[in-house]
């Protein structure tokens, strides 16, 4: 894979982890309010930064600093890991896959859990979470719908081990006909 394509995949991965407030901070700090203050889509913000030659596949360190500036140290670390892996590759052009479809991270689970909160029990059942576990989660988080949703995905991830993949989650969401969630977070997963 070319380093440019791997860089684009990194941007998609970061965008899926950035909330609206994070994007607002990026716009304010990096675009300096030049007409883009209403921009709320992280991918579009990244595109503007690429057009302005602020970031590129060979200016990834700047991206790590941006994540630090908006207080997203987790994403800064992800960018740094990407840079280290790219530097370790044989010729420097084979940057690592950022989202392989086999790794399931907490940022993705947080975002999905927020978007399926009303349907969390059905999703948990589709994913194979046992009914007693679903009821325990419900009792523990009766007034916290978002937390119950997130905890059910964590339980699935823990219990399923290596079978807990974005591909498996995408299939369950597709089976539930939650296509907006599928399109938003799983466009790179086959």
Image (tube, rainbow, N blue to C red):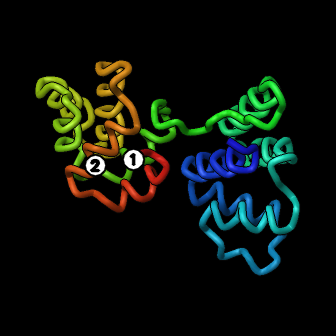
Proximity of marks 1 and 2: CB atoms separated by less than 8 Å: yes
At x 62%, y 36%, the residue is: 97
| Disc marking residue 112 | 1
Q: Quadrant of the C terminus?
A: top left
**Alpha-carbon span between mark 1 and mark 2:** 10 Å
Q: How many marks?
A: 2
Secondary structure under badge 1? helix
Asked whether, in this view, residue 154 is left or right of residue 22, the answer is left
At x 23%, y 30%, the residue is: 137
- Locate residue 30: give its quadrant: bottom right
Nearest to the eye among marks 1 and 2: give it. Answer: 2
Q: Quadrant of the N terminus?
A: top right
Give the percent coordinates (x, y) of residue 28.
Answer: 77, 65
Asked whether, in this view, residue 37 is left or right of residue 97, the answer is right
Disc on the earlier residue, 1 or 2: 1
Question: Which residue corresponds to mark 2?
Answer: 173
Q: Nearer the viewer, residue 10 or 151?
A: 10
Give the percent coordinates (x, y) of residue 169.
Answer: 33, 40
Q: Is residue 76 shown above or below 115? A: above
Asked whether, in this view, residue 40 is left or right of residue 188, the answer is right
Give the percent coordinates (x, y) of residue 159.
Answer: 29, 19
Crowding at mark 2 (Cα within 10 Å: few <14, some 14-19, many 20+): many
């Amino acid at each position: 894979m070319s380093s440019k394509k791997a860089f684009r995949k990194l941007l998609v991965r970061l965008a899926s982890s950035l909330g609206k407030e994070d994007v607002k901070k990026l716009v304010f700090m990096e675009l300096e309010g030049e007409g883009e203050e209403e921009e709320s889509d992280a991918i579009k913000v990244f595109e503007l930064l690429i057009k302005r030659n602020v970031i590129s596949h060979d200016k990834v360190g700047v991206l790590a600093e941006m994540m630090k500036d908006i207080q997203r140290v987790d994403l800064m670390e992800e960018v740094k890991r990407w840079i280290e892996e790219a530097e370790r590759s044989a010729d420097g052009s084979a940057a690592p896959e950022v989202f392989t479809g086999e790794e399931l991270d907490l940022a993705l689970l947080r975002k999905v859990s927020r978007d399926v909160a009303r349907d969390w029990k059905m999703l948990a059942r589709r994913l194979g979470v046992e009914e007693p576990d679903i009821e325990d989660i419900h009792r523990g988080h009766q007034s916290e719908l978002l937390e119950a949703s997130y905890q059910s995905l964590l339980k699935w991830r823990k219990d399923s081990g290596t079978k807990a993949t974005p591909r498996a989650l995408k299939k369950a969401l597709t089976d539930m006909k939650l296509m907006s969630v599928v399109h938003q977070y799983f466009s790179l997963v086959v």
